[in-house]
Image (cartoon, rainbow, N blue to C red):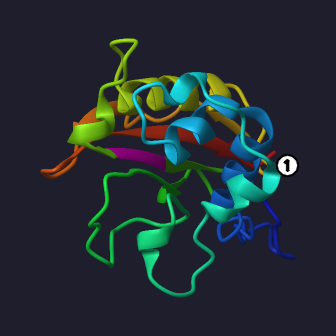
Amino acid sequence: MAITPGSTGYAKYEFLPKIAYECVKKLLEENELVWKLLKYTTPDAYSLSNLTKAEKGALIWKGDGTTNNFNVFMDGGLPDPEMKEVTILRISPYQLFPKNRSVGDIAMIMEVYSHHKINTMNNYETRVARIMQQLIETFNGAEIGGMGLMNFSKQGLSAVRVEEGGQIPFKGMWALFDNKVGA
């Protein structure tokens, strides 16, 4: 599965640097609504045209230049001050809980932040709440790139939850998902 045991049966967790990318890839392939809510800043963003693969790819920060021109990140933090009214998604490994020498759980954090001026849409939903719901729908019970089964349930880690976050002028929510790794 997601563990590569060494000759002594100890996990090497080789998937760790790749799991955020695999989550973004799954989202890119399986959820159009999230990408529309990230790209379009108008109150009717949910009803606009689906993005092409190239348009989605252009929203993902690839590690070079200023972060201000991107909406999707595979790490935490915000190194450059955000000056535009945008919505941001961050997906990254948060905690690793080994159960024994060859099996463990990884907590993935998914954070969504939207500038308060664009957060409420004309269907009376907020971008942040709708994106969070879509993340749960997409990832709960999903196999992530052969790295394990992602779930949104306290049957795995007791840390699994959604909480409000952000700092003015950005409103946000973050969720912890459990990903079981091992045989």
Question: Against 147, is 118 above or below?
Answer: above
Is 110 a magenta residue?
Answer: yes
Residue 32 appearing in the image: yes
Q: In the image shown, does 130 or 19 lie closer to the viewer?
A: 130
Q: In this view, does 74 lie above or below 67?
A: above
**Depicted 162 relative to depicted 116: above or below:** above
Percent across and percent down for residue 173 are 32, 38
Q: In this view, does 142 lie to the left or right of 118?
A: right
**Front residue (pair 135, 11):** 135
Which residues are drawn in magenta?
109-113
- Disc 1 crowd rating (10 Å Cα; few below 14, some 14-19, many 20+) is few
Query: At which x and y percent is residue 90?
Result: 47, 55
For residue 61, side relative to residue 57 (left or right): left
Picture quadrant where residue 162 is located? top left
Name the residue tied to disc 1: 146
Provide the major secondary structure of the magenta segment: strand
As helix, strand or loop, the secondary structure at mark 1 comes to: loop
Magenta stretch encompasses residue 131: no
Amino acid identity at mark 1: Gly
- Which residue is found at the position 33% from the left and 13% from the top? 124
Name the residue at the bottom extreme.
65
